[in-house]
Amino acid sequence: MNKKSFEISVIKTNAPKQKPDVTKGLPFGKIFTDHMFMMEYASEKGWYNPRIVPYAPLTLDPATNSLHYGQLIFEGMKAYKTPQGKINLFRPFENANRLNKSAERLCMPEIDPEITVSAISELLKLDSDWIPTQPGTSMYVRPFMMATDCNIYLPPSETYLFMIILSPVGHLYNNELTPMKILVENEYVRAAKGGTGFAKCAGNYAGAAKAAISAREKGYHQVLWLDAVHRKYIEEVSAMNVFFVIDNIVVTPYSPDSILDGITRNSAIAIIKDWGIPIEERPIAIEELAAAYDAGKVSEVFCTGTAAVISPIGEIGWKEKQMEFGSGKIGALTQKLYDEMTGIQTGERPDRFGWVYDVG
Ligand SMILES: *Cc1c(COP(=O)(O)O)cnc(C)c1O
């Protein structure tokens, strides 16, 4: 199926749900809209039967292969309604391409990015009344793909289901610009070289949960992962990439195999370069960070990811050491980056990089 032969059939719901009262605040990722997109894949046919239907539970055979072996991938992006009433997506082709990178790694079929983006666009247009417009709110878009062969042979499957669901969201945390406390994880690892760390595949997150719980029990919000071989080089935070400002140079880890290549990371790097601020993508050891901290050289630490966009880090715990940054306040560069990035995404600031995709 190519873009030309791609026609989405639409069955509208006859029982629209009650929309949330956004003035009371929106939880993250718990509310879903009236419709969903789905299409199937079979090796002899390719992708077929693209359709938008009322949001409803799936009926799955208990032997559905992905339920057993985790051949499951996903994406996440946000849509905004602009002050002019248009729907914006932020760099959706980057997500569509990354979905294909994840698919390739897990032996799943790729989807023409034009098709992915047009399916997202059609669904957003149909459920556009659900897109919240209060500051800090947006529509989270969740495409995902799963293996659907009904057997318990090892992967890969020969049949797949691709779906898109939409969730109106508020801030990921109550106030995303309140600095987070993160704990360096010394026992568990998230991703090894040669593994699936660069793919957005379901199993990565199941494997990470135990460390997150233990960090929370110690009073931290998230985990900072180290590399799996040396337990030395900083990788990323839960589902966000990490940046440090050391001696007025922005430094972010580089490890293409084991960290997720974040689109927010990528965009932050481009903006920082454009501002003429020096930035380095390179391995950074936790010992280097600690030494720079002791020398008073670390002025800001922040994370990037679709859900929270830019989040300041106020504290990092590493073994017995507690490092505090910015005395409980968001750093100047972190704030500036948050304002610029969200400004571009919502259409309130000029789209200097051509990142905004106009859904219509
Ligand atoms: C999705 C994700 C990110 C952030 O990627 P964005 O494209 O910026 O949303 C970072 N790390 C992990 C592990 C992720 O799953």
Image (cartoon, rainbow, N blue to C red):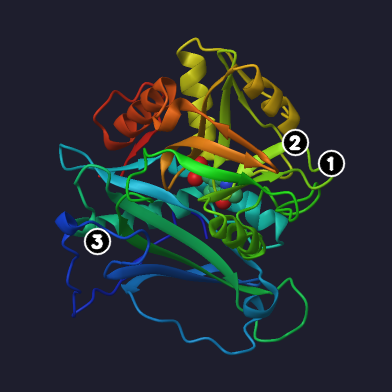
For image coordinates 40% across by 26% down, the residue present is 337
Circle 2 sits on which residue? 233
Question: In which quadrant is the C terminus drawn?
Answer: top left
Q: How far across and how far down the image is residue 129, in percent?
A: 18, 58
Q: Is ligand 1 less than 8 Å from the beta carbon at label 3?
A: no
For image coordinates 70% across by 75% down, the residue present is 69
Looking at the rendered structure, the kind of residue marked 1 is: His
Is residue 97 in view from this perspective?
Answer: no
N-terminal label among 3 and 2: 3
Q: How far across and how far down the image is residue 85, in percent?
A: 16, 43
Label 3 crowd (10 A; few <14 / some 14-19 / many >=20): some
Q: Secondary structure at mark 1?
A: loop
Name the outermost residue toward the front: 320
* Spatial CA span between label 3 and label 1: 48 Å
Q: Secondary structure at mark 3?
A: loop
N-terminal label among 3 and 1: 3
Circle 1 sits on which residue? 230
With 324 as the anchor, is 170 left or right in this view?
A: left
